[in-house]
Structure formats: C-alpha cells, structure tokens
Image (tube, helix red, strand yellow):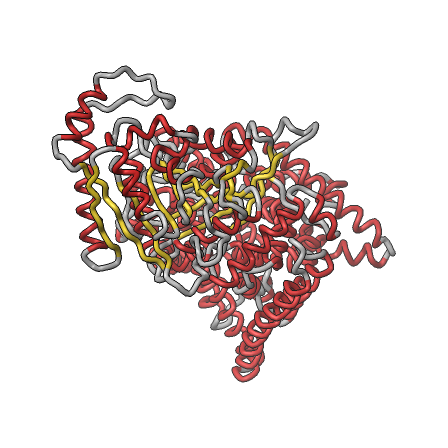
Amino acid sequence: MNFDRSMEMVTATPEKLKCEGAQISYFLILASVLVCILLLSHVFHLFLKPLGQPEPIAQILAGLVLGWSGLNRVPFIGSLFPLLADVQYRHLSILSRTIFMFLIGLEMDVPYTLRSLRISSTVASGGALLCSILAVPICQLIYPYIQADHNPGSRSNFTLTLMLIAASASSPLIIRIADDMKLSTSDVGRLAITASLLNDISCLFWAGFRITLWRTGIMGPWKASVGATFCFILLVVAIFLNKGLVRWLNGRNLHRQYLKNMEVAYILVVLIGLAVLLEWMDYVGDAACFFLGLMFPREGKSARTLSHKLAYPVYNIIFPLYFAYMGFQADVTRLKNLPDFIMVIVLLSLNIVGKMGGTLGACYFLKIPLNEGLLLALLLSFNGNLELLVLNSKFNKKTWNAAFTNGLNVTMVVNTLLVSPAVTFFVRRARRATTFKHVGLDWQKPDSELRILACVHGPRHGFNMTGIIDALTGPNNAITPYVMHLVELTGRNKGYVLYYTRDENDVSNDDNHYGGNEAVEISQNIDTFTAETGITVHLITAVSPYDTMHEDVCSGAEYLRASIIFLPFHKTQRLMDGKMEIDKEGIRTTNQRVLSHAPCSVGILVDKGLYVEDVGFNLDDAKRQQIAMLFFGGPDDREALTYGSRFATHPKVHLTVFRFLPTDKNYQVETQSKFSSRSNNDNEGEVVMSIPIQEMENDADQVFLSSFCRRYVTTGEVEYVEEYVGNMQETVAALRTISDMFSLFIVGKGRSGVCPFTTGMRDLKECPELGEVGDLLASSDFSVTGSVLIIQQHREPRKDAEFSIG
C-alpha cells in the first residue's frame, strides 16, 4: 500500500463512515483496534519481561506490528487500522494528553524538585544545549531533502523545529520506564525524572512561543500577542478556579475518605475545558495541564481521590495507546532508499551523541559519579513526546514531505528500542554490584534527605506519627514522609497480601471496607496535618495477616528507600490510671520481625501522655517542647542522637543530651573483662563484645560526640549534660530525676555488653525488643510522663552506597 495514499485514507475513512451512517460500527472498530493493541502488548511483555525490558517497549512493538510496518499493509486490515491513527491522536489525543500531563504534575515531588533545582536544571540543559548546537549544521544538510516551500522563513522555521525536537526528552516515557525498572524512588531515577520534566516543559514553552510567532505572521503581532496573553490569563483563572472548587469539595466531604465520581467530574471539566480551548486556539495545552496539576492543592481528599481515580486509566490504557502510536506511525519498510536510511542514522546519532555528551558534561561539572552520569544520560536520551506534537501540528504538515515525517517517526522508535536494552543492562550490572541497604545517618551529611515510613494500626497511632514527622521538619531538614496504614486481613483470603486503594462512591463503603472508620479518621488526620503544616504525607494502605505483615513493611521500606521505619508500640496507655495495656498482640509480633528483617533503621514509639492535658509531646501547644536524648554509647545511640539532632533544628523543640558515664574510669574495663569471659546465652543471641571492640566503640562515641558538640552544643541549639553513674541502680535513680521534665525521650536500643552500668536491667526486661533502657522507660512501673522513642540502627550498614540505583 502506498504510504501517501494510506495517509489520505486515514483522514477520509471517518468521514466516509459518517456519511454511510455507520457511527456505531465506527466505534466498534475503534474498540477492536484498542483491544488488539492492549492484548498484543501484553503478549510481547510476557516474552520481554524476563529479559528485563520495560512495558513501553512491548507497547511500541505492538504498534509496529499493527501499524504501517506490519498488518496495516494487509489490504483488509489496512482499511481498519488507519482509524487508530486518526481517532486516537485527533479525537482522543486532547483528552489523553490532558489527563496524563495533569497526573504527572499532580504526582510530581515538589519539595525534591525545589531542593534539586540547580542540579536537575543543569543536567536537563546539558544534553539539550549540545543537541541544539549540533542540530544547526545538520539542518543545512537535511533541509533540501524535506522538499519544503521556498518562502524566506521556511529554512529558519525548520532549523528551530529540529533544534527543539533534538533538545527534547520524553518525560512520560522516562517516568514509565523508571517506574518499571524500580528506579523512580532512587536518587538517580528521581533526578532523571525531574530533569526530563524540566526539559519537556521548557521545550513545550518554546513550542508555544514558536506558535505565537507563526500566528504573528498570519494574524499580525497585535492579535497574536492578545491570543498569547489570553491563554496565560486562562491558565491563571483555571488554577484559582480549581483551588476554590477543591476547597468546596473538601468541605463537603469531611467524613469521607474520597470524593464521589460526579465530584471528580467537576474538576476534570475545568481541566478538559482549559485544554480544549487552548487546542482550539492552535496552542499545545500540555504545559498548561501540567501546571494545573502542579498547582493543585495537595491537602484534603481531592488530590488523593484524583491520584487513585486517574492512575489506573493513565498507566493501563492511555500510556499503552500513547506508546503504541509511536510504533504505529513508523514505517520501516520505506527505508529502502539510501537517502532515507542515511537521514535516520543522522537523526539518531544527533539525539544519542548530543544527549549522552551534553549530559555527561553536565554531570562532570556537577561532580556526579560516572556510573550515575551514564545512567542519567541514557535515560534522558529517550524522546517522542514533543516529536508527536510537532509532527501533527498544522504549520508543519504542509511544509514537510511524508518521507521526512516518517524518518522522524522511525528515529523515535529505533532510539527507544536501542536505549532501553542499554539501560536494562546497566541497571542489572549495577544491582549485581550493590543492592540497596540503608546507611546509618551518622555516616551521612546532616542535610541529607530523610525518608520516613511511619506505620500505623489506628487513628491514635496516626496522631502520634504525624507529631514525630512534624518535629523532624526543621528549617534545613529535607524530609519525605510516608504513612502506611496496616490493616489485618482475616477470613478465607488470609494467605495473600493486598495493597489496597478504594474508590467507592457510597459513604457506607468507606466505613465497612478495609480499615473501616479507622481509615477515614487516619486520612482526616493526615489531611488536617498537611493543611496546617504544608507537609505532603503519602498515605499507603497495606492489608495482610499479622503473620506476613512485616514483609509489607520491609518491602515497602526497601522500595521507598526509607531512612527509618517508625512502628507503634503494642501497648497503649489507659487514661484512667496511666497503666500500659496490650492493644493487639499481633502488633508486637510484627514489630519484632521488622526489627530482625528491616533494610534500614527502626524506631518504636511508645505513647505515654500524649492525650493528657499539658503533658506529652505535642507541637500544637504554645509552649516549647522539651526532648531528652539519653546517650549510653554504641551504634544505636549514635543513630538515635543523629535523629535527635534533626529534632533540635525545629523552632518549637529544645533538645537536651544526657551522656551517661561511669564514676570510676577503670570500672568499665574491669566489668567488661568479666562479661567477656561469660558464654553467650542471652535471649537475643548477640555476642558479648571483647575489650578491644569495646574500646573501638568508645573511640567512635567520642569522635561522634565531639563532632556533634561542635555543630550543635557550641552554637546553643542543644544542651549537653554529663551524668556519672556507677551501677544500674544509680542509672535508674538518675532517670527518675528527669522522668517528669520532658515530653519525649529518645534512646538507642543498645546491644548486650555495650554499657556495663545498664546491663543489670536485662533481668527486668519485659519487652526485649525495646532494649534495656527503653523497656524501663516504657514500663507501667516507671512514671514517665513523656513518650519514648527507641531507635535501632540497621545491623549491617554498607559504607559504599553512593551509587543508589537498586
């Protein structure tokens, strides 16, 4: 089938069907085409997944098979499949691009983007700048080939367009591939996604500027500037209209976890209406939809509902059709002529050489390691988003011939099919060399990002955890908090794990489904917390039996690359007498297993006094909260003190560090020699430290405390007190003297044999998972009016963890 004739049939077929009154058949054929794409892409993915290839590769191959390079050349099928090219990109493109660009903006990590703006913008501009420079001489070689009209502005128009295409990176494709390869939460993956978004939006703005220039030549400068100004005002009005609508919808649904479907439609009407108006005025609405999602209010139920409602159709329907369309449009059979083949090679080399060289140069300037720079360069080499928009624009269709248009389409597909295996090989090689393991914060820089996974079983736990999260958000602290609602799975479905998100319309379903009223209260608490503090908290629901609940927590922490897991204690304090009583025994089992298998540090929060007036840790109070850090020595205490320093930077918190030292300098060595001669039969199965190891730990403690004091104590941010004790009884007495002075106590779990003047508490331990001091403070017999946070450092930290792919 002749290519130009086929392209004419794409436009003519829908009109012919309408003239024949076959509108129903038209939609049936369209549905059949879409089903064929989805089915064939799943078949390809079954074969490509064991090879580590992401799902977009299978979808592009499905488009190749069904498009101009494959079945579309069969006479009967060729009369049906051109419908996809017309309908999917002409009739459905506005809706599809509107929704997925809005969702990308809605899910964008704004705090990380602001923190890494200099680095990500430099990385994004490196490849774009080199590609734009290289595109200028290449344009002079290719221009005669496109058979453009010879008006004075055609050559400059072609040069600017090719520069824009070469500089662009496909953010939807990069986001999807990074997610499939489990890179979206890694440092290098997040940097690649942010850089691609900055690149994509910048190129879209330049494309809009070019459209304004094009309209100026047709309509005159006055009308063109008025049109551009109107589009900008329209975007601002839509943003404020959405904010008011969201505030109203959140107020309507105070006792619900999600909005109704009709209420979601109200928001989408504003979104789609904006996109349609911009497209009607010949402007590309992608950037406007992205900014509408970026400026969307994150607090409340609206943002959470839209993320849940739109995620499935975008990732399972819209994206597959978007990627299949890339393969559908490319016709590799037309590369029989040598000039066509050379043009594709030249365009492919321009993209790969320019993106790789420019990105590596930017990474060298930023002192990013070579292995991370190579992966960034490969990821940013993907293209396709802007190319599809430019190729379907009105002012390019009339000036470019079909051969050049097909060459660009083939270049997009070949580039993706070449770069993706390279990314897969690189990621697999890096993961074999180093897998993800958390490095304790005392090895990291003080301003490093703190990724928190706070687990809750009920509303009270949610209130406590948000208080801890709030206290960790000092002025210079980078924090990304996640709250995981752990729900026990009972009944016949007890054998599997379910990550569950609800989108029911009925209010009763919110109460009777997984989590019930507790889920609604937890979401309300998080919404209120986000509205008051401006801190975005990501809510996850994990439903599983207690036997496997720890696997949910550990796998979630590994995927999210959490710095620490916060767990609630299995006992709660009774309001009537202040005694501690067991909430659910399954919570304790989960805590113990998480402590044994966690890929990062773990903190257990014991709630004591949080609901007593004027007592307990509550940053909502007008008074400044007093926190005590109890330092006895060892890795766990050093990790706990590092977290304590994060608390100290909060303006409403005052931290006091109590370092416990032996009254006799020789006491510790003499006592330790007795411990080292004992056999190891303790409950935790930990080896008693020998004297040389103990001396090494003491030296590490001294170096760490010296650095801590220089940074925080000498500046007056933290108060430092030394307590001298000779035995366990004196330690307990010292703790009793400060038991009612602080609203939160932080202490490391500790290990057997590390601190001789606390080891005697071992015989009194009721909950070994809290450690000796933590168990004492958490017991009902010890009258502590403040809550207790016990921290255990990850047992096997890796010191060579700079390359954070896996």
Residue with the most extreme left position? 666
Q: Which residue occupies the foreground of this view, 294 or 222?
A: 294
Q: Position of residue 537 (x, y in %)?
A: 50, 53
| For residue 237, side relative to residue 437 (left or right) | right
- The part of the image, by quadrant, that contains residue 636 is top left
Residue 687 appears anywhere in the view: yes
Say which residue appears at 63% left-offset and 33% top-offset. Answer: 489
Query: What residue is shown at x 29% (from left), y 28% (from top)?
Result: 760
Q: Is residue 529 above or below residue 77?
A: below
- Does any portion of residue 199 appear in the rendered image? no
Q: Tell me if residue 124 comes above or below residue 757 in the rendering.
A: below
Left or right: residue 404 compared with residue 69: left
State left or right for residue 321 relative to residue 456: right
Q: Nearer the viewer, residue 263 or 372?
A: 263
The quarter of the picture where the N terminus appears is top right
Q: To which quarter of the image does residue 640 belong? A: top left
